[in-house]
Amino acid sequence: MNDAFRLLDDPTRLSTHLTSRSWKLGWGRMTTIVDEQWGRVVSSHVVRRGRAFGMLLFLDEVVTEREMPRRKVWETVGEPRLIVIGPYRMGFEIAPSDSGVLLHVSIDYDLPSHGISRLLGYLLGRVYAKWCTREMLLQAKALLALPRRSVPWSARHHPPMRQVPI
């Protein structure tokens, strides 16, 4: 369980569905920027910015709970600039099982506060939340299935990121 938590504790590892270009993001993508704690302690910040469907996106997340090796929770600070969801609280829980670990990923979100994004949120927010959590689970499954010697990602698999103080 400790190994699984250490791998999933890295905020870039569960977000490759956002950092890789795909039609689901209108051929856009987001970049991850971490603070000096790399999103691995309570109060640590992770900023994501980029484009989707030609629109600029921005969000600032703060880690609010971290109980190694079992649970991590983070939430947005302020009003994120997203398309179909507004402020959110997200996290994962790990439990031991006979075949390894069980992973639960959850998101609790509000609709965007105004404009076309609010309407799109009514129509697509739930679909997006399900897609996002499902992608995170698939990424975790693939990551945890790698042989131990392959766990550190090579540069070609690592999403674009840089470390900056916030």
Image (cartoon, rainbow, N blue to C red):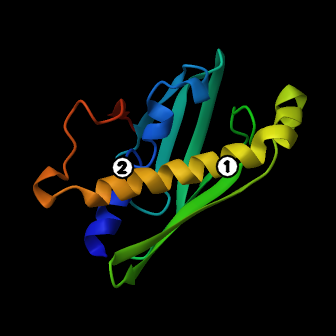
Name the kind of residue labelled 2 in the image.
Trp
The image shows residue 136 at horizontal and vertical percentages of 49, 52
Q: Upstream in the sequence, badge 2 or badge 1? A: 2
- Residue shown at 69% from the left, 38% from the top: 80
Q: Nearer the viewer, residue 100 or 95?
A: 100
Q: Which residue is mark 1?
A: 129
Query: Quarter of the image holding residue 123?
Result: top right
Query: Quarter of the image holding residue 97?
Result: bottom left
- In this rendering, the answer to whether 126 lies above or below 116 is below
- Residue shown at 69% from the left, 32% from the top: 81
Can residue 65 be seen here? The reply is no
The image shows residue 13 at horizontal and vertical percentages of 37, 48
Q: Residue furthest front?
A: 99
Name the kind of residue labelled 1 in the image.
Ala
Q: Which residue is mark 2?
A: 38
Q: Is residue 115 toward the left or the right of residue 98 in the image?
A: right
Q: Nearer the viewer, residue 101 or 74?
A: 101
Contact, mark 2 vs mark 1 (Cβ under 8 Å): no
How packed mark 1 is, by other alpha carbons closer than 10 Å (few <14, some 14-19, many 20 or more), is: some
